[in-house]
DNA sequence: TTATATTTGCCAATATGTGACAAGTCAATA
DNA sequence: TATTGACTTGTCACATATTGGCAAATATAA
């Protein structure tokens, strides 16, 4: 499993009965690019993710989460210490959060 | 917190009473590069990580885990959905593992 | 077929990462 | 305070990766 972000975008786009070209136009991007993003062949910019959330009427965090998850998955996918590494990284995130408060 | 990998390498190197230049030589790399890797200014290649494990007599997984964790942290560090995204990615990893079996 | 939607392949432009080296700081000590 | 040795910093050319854009290929439907 992979490309949770692209899959979600495609589903949302279809729910809104939009064509690739229509969504692409609103996002001010090439239709082909968007096609690639939906199929996970290319990565969207964060800015694009936020625009998508607005257009497709979902809370930004929902999309950002999937978009980030895909990137994490990409980093660890071929590693057999993937789960351990994620636990270690999780602790780092928790600690850095504490420092901010 | 960050750069767990580099910190570990530095500690191991010092435990082995090696100079940067000595370890760098065994790794066949520039002393300055290694310095940057230890301080987290540059990323080591996986190949280098494995060589380090051999030289510093630790199991490769130990270093690979920290090295990966740093990379994950880099991806998520500025995102407030970091923890959620990691949970989502974790599920993907678990599922892809199952498929292999 | 024809029309429309999507995908694919390619390329030039841009951005990012890497290796190598020289010069810099810093600490110890003669 | 000069010298030495360890480490750090800055820079630059080069390689590698990513991106945007277009055109052609491939569906899909009428």
Image (spheres, coloured by chain):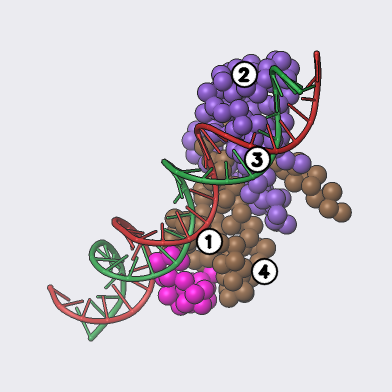
Chain colours: A purple, B brown, C green, D red
Marker disc for residue A41: 3
CA gap, disc 1 to disc 4?
A: 17 Å
Disc 1, SS: loop
Q: Are marks 1 and 2 on the same chain?
A: no
Disc 3, SS: loop
Q: Which residue is mark 4?
A: B59
Judging from the image, mark 2 belongs to the subunit labelled A
Marker disc for residue B60: none
Q: Which residue is mark 2?
A: A22
Judging from the image, mark 3 belongs to the subunit labelled A
Residue contact at pointers 3 and 1, CB within 8 angstroms: no
The nearer-to-camera label among 1 and 4 is: 1
Percent position of residue A36, x then y: 64, 35
Q: Are marks 1 and 4 on the same chain?
A: yes
Q: Earlier in the sequence, mark 2 or mark 3?
A: 2
Q: Nearer the viewer, residue B47 or B15?
A: B47
Q: Which residue is mark 1?
A: B44
CA gap, disc 2 to disc 3?
A: 20 Å
Percent position of residue B35, x then y: 43, 64
Point out the stretch of residues depicted in magenta: B12-34
């Amino acid at each position: 499993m992979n490309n949770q972000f692209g899959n979600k975008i495609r589903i949302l786009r279809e729910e809104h009965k939009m064509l690739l070209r229509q969504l692409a136009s609103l996002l001010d991007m090439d239709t082909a690019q968007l096609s690639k993003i939906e199929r996970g062949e290319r990565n969207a910019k964060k800015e694009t993710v936020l625009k998508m959330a607005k257009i497709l009427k979902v809370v930004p965090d929902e999309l950002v989460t999937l978009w980030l998850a895909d990137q994490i998955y990409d980093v660890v996918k071929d590693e057999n210490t993937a789960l351990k590494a994620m636990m270690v990284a999780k602790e780092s995130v928790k600690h850095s959060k504490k420092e901010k408060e």
